[in-house]
Amino acid sequence: MRLLFVAILGSFLLLDVFVFWRMYALLGAVRRPWIWRVILCLLAFTALAFWIGVAVALPLMGGMRDPLPRWLVASLYIWHFLTLPLMAAALLLDLLIRAFRKAWRLLHSDAGQHTPPESPPAPMLSRRNFLTSIGMTAVPAATLSMAGVSMSQLGKFRIMPYQLSVAGWPRELDGYTITVVADVHAGVFSTQKMLDDIADATNRLRSDLILLAGDLINISLSDLPGALDMVLRMDARDGVYMIEGNHDVIQGPDRFDHAVRRRGVNLLVDELTTITPAHPGVPFQLLGPRWTDDRFRDDSVAYTAALRDPGLFPLMLAHHPHSWDTAAACGIPLVISGHTHGGQIMLTDRIGGGPLRFKYWSGRYDRPGSTLIVSNGVGNWFPLRINAPAEILHITMHPGA
C-alpha cells in the first residue's frame, strides 16, 4: 500500500511540474507575462506544497481535514485527480503537434532555394494564447466550481429501495428487511452531522438487519472511534454486522480489526455467522470475506463460501463487486457489495468511471442462480459525484421461483 501511495504521489508531482512548466513557457506570448507567471507560481506552490506536506508529515494522508479548510482540500483533490490529467494531456498533445510541425518543415524544406521569411501572424488569437487563456482562467475556475458543487453534495444521500426476489430465500422470511450502509469514508470529507444523519436515517428504516459493506473510514485510524460511535448507534432486531474494505486497512488490517472488535462491533473477516430471526426463527447465514487485492480475492471468497452450512441460505457481504464471479461459481445466491461509488463520475448510466474500472458498478446484476447488488455508497474519498448519488440501500427480501 505504501508503494502504491508513493507511485500515485510521484505521478501527481511529475504532472504538476510538467503542466506548470508548459504553462510558464506559454505565458511568454501574452501581454504582461510576469503578472500571469506570478499567479501561476502561486498556484504551483499551493499544489506542490499540499502533496509534499502529505508525503513528509502524513505519509498515509491521515487526518488531513484538521489543518486545512475542507473546500481547499476538495479543490486540490479535484485538481489532481480530475483536472490535472486532462490539462496534462492537452499540453502534451500541443507539444507533440509543435514537434511534428517543426520536423515536417525541416524534412520538406528545399535547402537549395532561398526560403522566404514567414509572413507576420494574422491578428487573431493564436493556439498558444488560446491554451494559455484556458489554462489560466477556465481551468482554475472549473476546478473551484466543481469544488463548490462537491461541498454542496457532502452529507447528502438517498434511500434506495429494492424489492428482491431470490430463489432459496426462506418463505417464512418473506418481507425480511436489510439496510446496507457502504463506503462511509469517515475522514477528510465527512462531518459529525453526516455520521449522525447516517445513523438516524438507518434507524428510521427499522430494518431487521443492518450491514456495513466496508470502507468505514477513509484512511486514518484516528477517525475510527467516531465512525464506530455511529455504528454503535445503529439498531436492528437481528444485529449490525460489518466487513473491512480497502480503505479500512491502509494503516494495517490487524490494527483496524482489533480496534473494531474491542468496541464490540460484529466484524466478519473470512468468517460467517448464522442469523436466527426471533420470529419465525428460520436461520440463514451471513458470510464476510476479508479484503484482499486482486491476486488473493478469489481465494478469500472461495474460502469463506466453503464454510457455509449447505442447509441454510447464504448471503455474502463482499466489499469488491468482482467477488461475485467467484461467489456465484461457489453457489452463493446473493452478494451485496460497495466499493465503486456508483462510478463516482458518470456522464450517462453507461459512460463514465464505473464501466472504465469495473464490470459491475451500480445496482442489480443477475445471472442464473445468483444476484449481485452494488451500493453507490454513502460517503466519499473523492469529494465530487456526477450521476452517481450517495445512497443507503433498503432491501426487502422475497422468496423467488
Image (cartoon, rainbow, N blue to C red):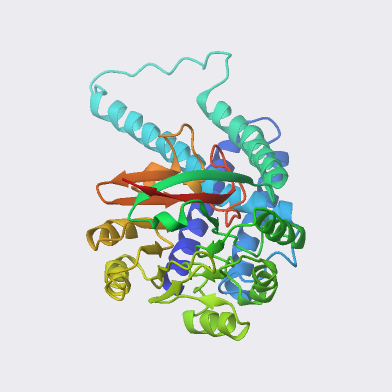
Q: Position of residue 136 (x, y in %)?
A: 64, 37
Say whether residue 49 is left or right of residue 249.
right
Above or below, 354 against 310 in this view is above
Q: Nearer the viewer, residue 330 or 82?
A: 330
Whether residue 337 is visible, yes or no, is no
Q: Position of residue 395 (x, y in %)?
A: 51, 50
Say whether residue 199 is left or right of residue 218.
right
Residue at point 71%, 64% (across, down)? 65
Q: Nearer the viewer, residue 110 or 2?
A: 2
Above or below, 369 against 292 in this view is above
Q: Quadrant of the N terminus?
A: bottom left
Whether residue 105 is visible, yes or no, is yes
Q: Nearer the viewer, residue 2 or 150?
A: 150
Q: Quadrant of residue 179?
A: bottom right
Say whether residue 192 is left or right of residue 391.
right
Above or below, 12 against 281 in this view is above
Q: Position of residue 320 (x, y in %)?
A: 40, 60
Residue at point 52%, 59% (across, down)? 13
Q: Quadrant of the C terminus?
A: top left
Q: Position of residue 73 (x, y in %)?
A: 67, 56
Q: Quadrant of residue 177?
A: bottom right
Residue at point 56%, 26% (across, down)? 130
